[in-house]
Image: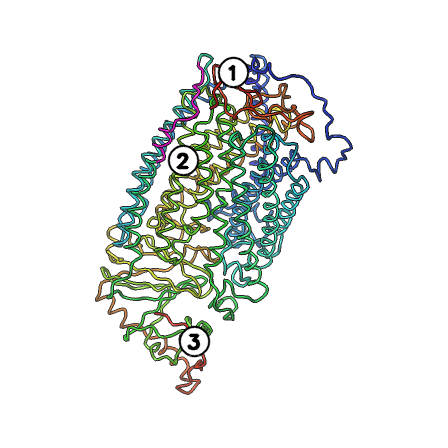
Amino acid sequence: MSTFFLLLILLLGFLITFQIAKASEYVGVLKGEKKNFEQHNRINGFLMIVFLVLGLIGVYWCNELFKGRILGESASKHGEEIDKMLYITIAITGVVFVATQILLFWFAYKYQYSEKRKAHYFPHDNRLEVIWTVVPAIALTVLVGFGLFYWFRITGDAPQDAMQIEVTGKQFGWIFRYPGKDGVFGKKYYQNISDKDNNQLGLIWDDAATHDDIVVGNEMYCVVNKPVKLIIGSRDVIHDVGLVYFRQKMDAVPGTPTTMWFVPKFTTDEMKKKLGNPDFEYEISCDQMCGRGHYTMRGIVKVVTEDEYKLWLAKQKPNYASVMQDKAPAVPAGAAPADSTKTTAAIIK
Amino acid sequence: MSNEATLHGHTEVAIAHGEHHDGHGEHHQTFITKYVFSQDHKMICKQFLITGMIWAIIGGLMSVLFRLQLGYPDAHFKFLEDILGSKWAKGGQIQPEFYYALVTMHGTILVFFVLTGGLSGTFANFLIPLQIGARDMASPFLNMLSYWFFFAASIVMFSSLFLATGPASGGWTSYAPLSALGDANEGSKAGMDYWLIAMALFVVSSLLGGLNYISTILNMRTKGMSMTRLPLTIWAILFTAILGVLSFPVLLSGFILLLFDRHAGTSFYLSDIFLSETGKALSNEGGSAILYQHLFWFLGHPEVYIIILPAMGLVSEVMAVNARKPIFGYMAMVGSLFAITILAFLVWAHHMFVTGLNPFLGSVFVLLTLLIAVPSAIKVFNWLTTLWRGNIRFTPAMLFAIGFVSTFISGGLTGIFLGNSTLDIQLHDTYFVVAHFHIVMGVSGILGMFAGIYHWYPKMYGRYMNNTLAYIHFWVTFVGAYLIFWPMHYEGLAGMPRRYMDYSNWISFNQFGGLNRFISTVAMITFAVQLLFIFNFFYSMFKGRRVMTRNPWGSTTLEWTAPIRPGHGNWPGEIPEVHRWPYDYSKDGREFIPQTEPLGAGESTH
């Protein structure tokens, strides 16, 4: 019913607007077209300057309103560089934005039609053209220079002592693998994947290196101030590991592993205090459209101290161990899934 | 309102007034040959325009629906279930499959069917023959086919909305493997096949049109119309057509490979896939999901220039006419169009900085991408200088042209953020991207299109649109667009991902609930005002004030020397000869000098 009324009001609004518009056209004819034109021109010229002033105030006000809600200090070292780049870019583009918008609406207002004015015949001026080719080119060179400097630092090789974690996206969740005591990720092959048999990643049990690999879902632990390198993949479609507070993002592509690394600066607990939010978590958001549950594909990064990490790690049971335990009652030990034929298995390193 | 006509009536003396009873080409026309299978470029233009407008309403309505969801994620809108059924809107709440179908179709429709088919199709068809002085296109028949392929594409795309499994829903980019696997996504079932077939038909239409535009511009200019005497509209359309002809085939090849992957068991894009839905691993190995993105963006990026270049052309022309000044730096304008066209082919991978692309390759694309800002800056400063010391008439078209420059600046500057790979790490696939491309491509493109429609409406239909409605339309649209998209930058800076249908469960992104409601409200108002425009357009076609003079805007270009309602063939008798460039406004104390007027004794060329 309310929908019906809403539509009725809308229709009425249209009708009224239309009648006013029609009437104003008749009034225009009565007033004389020239006078009518001049009046409309003055109103629109005035609105140009109103738009400029209110617009600039609006931009300032919008910034005041939202600047406190855009994440604040970066929680990773790389993020600091990205933030620096952001401020350099905002400074340069901000000046251009304000200057050009002022010129645009000011000119529109100032040079609006007047019977007395003659437009100035000014078809070209090579000096001006050179100025506004060279100046933007220089500004952009500065931006490209800074941008690439930071880009290569961020995408460069991870330090040797970085802790390695394998991240795998699936519809719609995250799976994390730690290499275990041997520090080596065992081989895996996607045809071995079986959620039923508790082998979410398709690990090849014939490879002894898999036996101590730890596989966990949804929560990833890493150590504060210690570089962490993510080896990212996907089981099905393309996902993306988005870490807003660390200012990091990398696609998870099926069949093509990708990597990224960063150094977390604050533990989750420190962030809770810093932001005054006891519910705070570092969230992993999927940033690449992946199907109906895309918006629910949430993971969590727990940044903890070295001691807390060791404690957590000690409590984890390798995937292999739990699989064998599950199987033990039914199948005699040693009857691991036979996949020895798959010698071409994808090797993750 | 032809106040301008009165205002500049004294300049009309050179041109004969009166009714024109030229039956040229009009005889023996049946309803079918005149209005349906017409080979007259002016009728084809109107067919493209009206089809585009229908699509714009459908696409806009979709955005209203998903803005309803984004603004009020917890609300139950009973009427939605009544209209859409319980599969798509259970209990009055939009379901995820439907939400993703809506955003996908909104993008596809607006980018391809409105701002490519609708914009280029309309103004290329209308302006090329009229402004270069030709009777029609090089091949009127291919031109007609171009529209009917567009029509067929529209029918197929529209039918997909009614499939039981819904239309395509993998985003307008339709990235594989999501788009390749029906088991991974409801919309990747039959909906994706319809989408691919419709897009293939669309590419055919675009190629037929594009080849025609290029050959007409190069071969059929009237006597005296050298390339440097072409209005900037024609230059812009020429470069647009070249972009389309060179990049659409690559897109088509990408789509064909996708069809093979879907139905022929090939592995172009597929590798190492296990689907939880079926619990089975696929046999495909060795494909590259990234290959699809390369093929897609090789068109996808030029596509944004295919949208914006015609708008730039229309705006340049409208601005010069209504500022009563020559466009500043004509050759620089042509040069920057050319530079943008070349660079458009060399920047596609900036959409792929975080796909695992080699960082060195990424750095090359950063450099080339930011290089595009130089010709863009040249164009902006030239427009500003065109306004400087002009004598500006705020016709509705002129307002839209000024609005275009404003949004093009705003959206162009945020492109400098996104083209910088370092910042793209944080901003990729967030609302910052949504804000950027909507302002620079969506809003600017549509403002340019409106400028064109309001400016050439008298030429198309021999009547004026209602000015008061046009002014309301402009100011609400322009202010609304900024209110909708400006705050989205902040959501993007906060890393808020796009293509989420509900943010309330996210600690990092739930601080924008109020803002999302605000944006949704403004979006609905802005959409409602577009309906006012649609009404004005059709009402004025029959009831608008008649155009009484051939050249109501006091313009120099050739289309205004044709009769008020030109027949098939455009000019009765000889096609006019051209003696000068199209921007002699306020030269030598004269308000404007038509292109057809020979140079006076001792008069300098521009």
| Placement of the N terminus of chain A among the 4 image quadrants | top right
Specify whether B575 is left or right of B427.
right
Helix, strand or loop at label 3? It is loop
Residue where numbered disc 2 is placed? B409
Q: Mark 1 sits on what residue?
A: B601
Give coordinates of residue A5: x percent, y percent.
Answer: 57, 36
The residue that label 3 is drawn on is: A344
Whether tag 2 and tag 3 are in contact, CB under 8 A, the answer is no
Mark 1 neighbour class, 10 Å CA radius: few under 14, some 14 to 19, many 20 or more: few
- Which residues fall within the magenta stretch? A117-133
**Residue under disc 2 on the same chain as residue under disc 3:** no
Q: Chain of mark 3?
A: A
Q: Amino acid at mark 1?
A: Ala
Q: Is residue B321 magenta?
A: no
Residue B57 can be seen, yes or no? no
Amino acid tagged 2: Ile
Residues at marks 3 and 1, CA–CA distance in whole angstroms: 84 Å
